[in-house]
Image (cartoon, grey):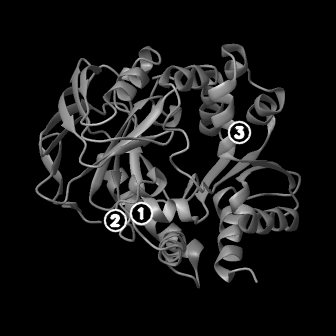
């Protein structure tokens, strides 16, 4: 018997997040473990009049490609992948990893080569999204692997996921619309502002937001959601930052990351674990050492770090930076094959100042929110 929350989440993804309309072409990329949710998504797309194509994957396929594939094979981009990115109306990505550590032994050089070969796909996706021609959403289906990372039983983690995505089971769409209304107050307050100053443990960072646009995230691209973000002026970051939470990328857990910025560029980077992976990733391409995103997490329903960035970057009381590609709708022009989110807790004395005014303290907005 299907969990009724699964059907509810599928409806939210199809009819709210990407708003499928009659005739829309929709690619659903799902891990085999997410089959129950994928089936419900498929039915909802059909009911909305869309044309779904289902693409099942397993992490093992990418693992084998990177372990045994030649450089040419690793860099090869298949025509269907390119066609969907360039021509489809929407995509839904359903993650369901059973083993989140399967990629930890992969040579970082091969991971970098894989990402670099797909730089143009990322740029196309971001451009079409900003133009309003491409809609996408990312969601997670609960697995034992995710539950173990979060330090929960599968039942506990399943409740955590659904409570984050469906805080109001009776009116999930109304909840996300209301969150957007609240976040828009902050976005409006930030309009026209120029300088951000972040102060926290081992963190003193300034960056420019002059001429940039903040975006309120309300479940349209990620589910769950809850953040406001922009793309900082590329050459503006000055200072240093310490990320209190581990940064996860391709199954690698990098802890204790410290970055130093000069004229927008990461000029020094250290980590307490997996430092080599951090440095190789930052050297993927020139844009990887510049910031593509500055964001504040706003989800009151996500307070625990779970080692899944889809949830962790939304933690209420946190901020995050992304090294690499920026979103064109914010005004960012930074290009890279990388977009690596790194999260910092601000609930213990952290502050965000904007043009000399205090916006955020101890994980709370000072202005009306």
Q: With respect to residue 118, does 72 lie above or below?
A: above
Q: Which residue is mark 2?
A: 304
Q: CA distance from mark 3 to mark 2?
A: 31 Å
Dot 3 lies on which element?
helix
Q: CA distance from mark 1 to mark 2?
A: 8 Å
Q: Are marks 3 and 1 in contact (CB under 8 Å)?
A: no
**Image coords of residue 11 (percent x, y):** 71, 70
Q: Are marks 1 and 2 in contact (CB under 8 Å)?
A: yes
In which quarter of the view is residue 85 placed?
A: top right
Q: Is residue 180 visible?
A: no
Horizontal relation, residue 176 to residue 347: left or right: right
Horizontal relation, residue 360 to residue 54: left or right: left
Residue sitting at x 69%, y 22%: 69
Q: CA distance from mark 3 to mark 1?
A: 25 Å
Q: Which residue is mark 1?
A: 150
Dot 2 lies on which element?
loop
**Image coords of residue 230 (percent x, y):** 39, 40
Closer to us: mark 1 or mark 2? 1
Neighbour tally class for label 1: few under 14, some 14-19, many 20 plus, Cα within 10 Å = some
Residue sitting at x 47%, y 16%: 285
Q: Which residue is mark 3?
A: 61
Q: With respect to residue 92, does 206 lie above or below?
A: above
**Image coords of residue 236 (percent x, y):** 26, 23
């Amino acid at each position: 018997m299907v969990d009724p929350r699964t059907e509810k989440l599928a409806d939210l993804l199809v009819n709210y997040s990407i708003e499928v309309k009659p005739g829309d072409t929709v690619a659903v990329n799902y891990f085999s473990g997410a089959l129950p949710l994928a089936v419900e998504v498929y039915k909802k797309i059909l009911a909305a009049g869309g044309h779904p194509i289902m693409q099942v994957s397993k992490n093992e396929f990418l693992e084998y490609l990177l372990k045994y594939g030649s450089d040419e094979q690793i860099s090869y981009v298949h025509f269907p992948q390119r066609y969907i990115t360039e021509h489809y109306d929407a995509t839904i990505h359903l993650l369901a990893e059973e083993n989140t550590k399967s990629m930890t032994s992969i040579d970082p050089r091969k991971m970098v080569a894989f990402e670099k070969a797909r730089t143009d796909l990322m740029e196309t996706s971001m451009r079409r999204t900003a133009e309003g021609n491409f809609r996408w959403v990312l969601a997670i289906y609960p697995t034992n692997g995710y539950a173990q990372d979060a330090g929960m039983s599968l039942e506990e983690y399943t409740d955590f996921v659904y409570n984050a995505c469906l805080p109001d089971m009776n009116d999930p769409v109304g909840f996300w619309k209301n969150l957007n209304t609240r976040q828009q107050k902050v976005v409006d307050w930030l309009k026209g502002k120029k300088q951000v100053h972040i102060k926290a443990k081992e963190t003193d960072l300034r960056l420019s937001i002059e001429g940039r646009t903040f975006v309120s995230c309300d479940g349209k691209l990620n589910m769950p959601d809850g953040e406001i973000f922009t793309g900082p002026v590329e050459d503006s970051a000055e200072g240093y930052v310490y990320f209190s939470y581990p940064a996860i990328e391709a199954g690698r857990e990098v802890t204790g990351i410290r970055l130093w910025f000069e004229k927008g560029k990461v000029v020094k980077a250290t980590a307490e674990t997996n430092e080599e992976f951090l440095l190789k990733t930052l050297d993927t391409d020139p844009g990887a050492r510049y910031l593509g995103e500055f964001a504040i997490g706003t989800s009151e329903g996500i307070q625990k770090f779970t080692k899944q960035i889809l949830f962790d970057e939304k933690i209420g009381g946190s901020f995050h930076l992304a090294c690499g590609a920026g979103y064109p709708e914010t005004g960012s022009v930074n290009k890279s094959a990388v977009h690596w989110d790194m999260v910092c807790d601000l609930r213990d004395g952290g502050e965000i100042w904007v043009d000399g005014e205090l916006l955020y303290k101890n994980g709370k907005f000072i202005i009306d929110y």
